[in-house]
Image (cartoon, rainbow, N blue to C red):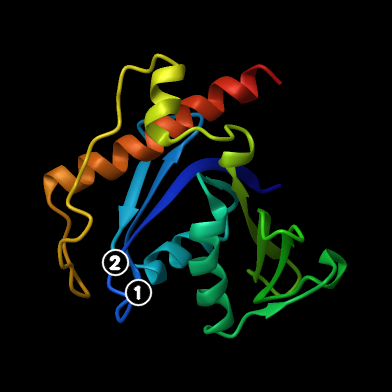
Amino acid sequence: MKLSLCYAGDFETTTDENDCRVWAYSLCNVDDFTDFKYGTSIDEFFEFCQDYLHNYKIWFHNLKFDGEFIINYLLTHGFTWIKDKKDKADKTFTTLIGDMGQFYNITVYFQVYKTKTNKVEFFDSLKIFPNFSVEKVAEAFNLPIHKLSIDYKKYRPLGYQLNTQEIDYIRNDVEIMARALKEMFSRG
């Protein structure tokens, strides 16, 4: 039986409309805050997602934003949208997007073995914490960490290596959300 792991996730993206891409991703395990992962491209992120041992649930705070990068990646890398999960197969995905453009869920399927399908499910934590920024979530839960800041407009070329300040920034963002999600899940 596959182990399902739950993470808070986030993408950092360029602000140049002529070079719109993910320059960093970060993940923090909801059940173990020391389990922090990050990388420098959406390709690396999807390599992580295709782990044959685990199914993942990854919560993005504002899936509408990050989900557009996910869907763009899927559609440009040979994945096919399916209407019903009964039709799941390697490189397929489903979406739950409301009439007003609200993103609720994206589920991506990968074939691991000839008869086994792995999946990663993306959810929107903004639906649990509506109208709460990451900074406000940290304050509301009186967390021991807080939101940091970075230069969002700084040029970060392909292959850019994050500095310590940027790693601390992305770690705090996902750890804040992981801590808040753990608290909410413990409340049922």
Q: Position of residue 86 (x, y in %)?
A: 87, 67
Q: Position of residue 177 (x, y in %)?
A: 46, 33
| Residue 27 sits above or below residue 51 on the image | above
Q: Quadrant of the C terminus?
A: top right
- The amino acid beneath tag 1 is Cys
Mark 1 residue element: loop
Quadrant of the rendered image containing residue 53? bottom right
Instruction: Identify the residue position indicated by label 2 in the image.
Output: 14
Left or right of residue 113, residue 60 in this image: left
Q: Residue drawn at (40%, 30%), measured in percent from left and top?
A: 176
| Residues marked 1 and 2 touching at CB (< 8 Å) | yes
* Image label count: 2
- The amino acid beneath tag 2 is Thr
- Dot label at residue 20: 1
Q: Position of residue 150 (x, y in %)?
A: 19, 47
Quadrant of the rendered image containing residue 159? bottom left
Q: Position of residue 126 (x, y in %)?
A: 57, 40
| Residue 115 sits above or below residue 3 on the image | below
Crowding at mark 1 (Cα within 10 Å: few <14, some 14-19, many 20+): few
Left or right of residue 25, residue 56 in this image: right
Q: Residue drawn at (22%, 46%), measured in percent from left and top?
A: 167
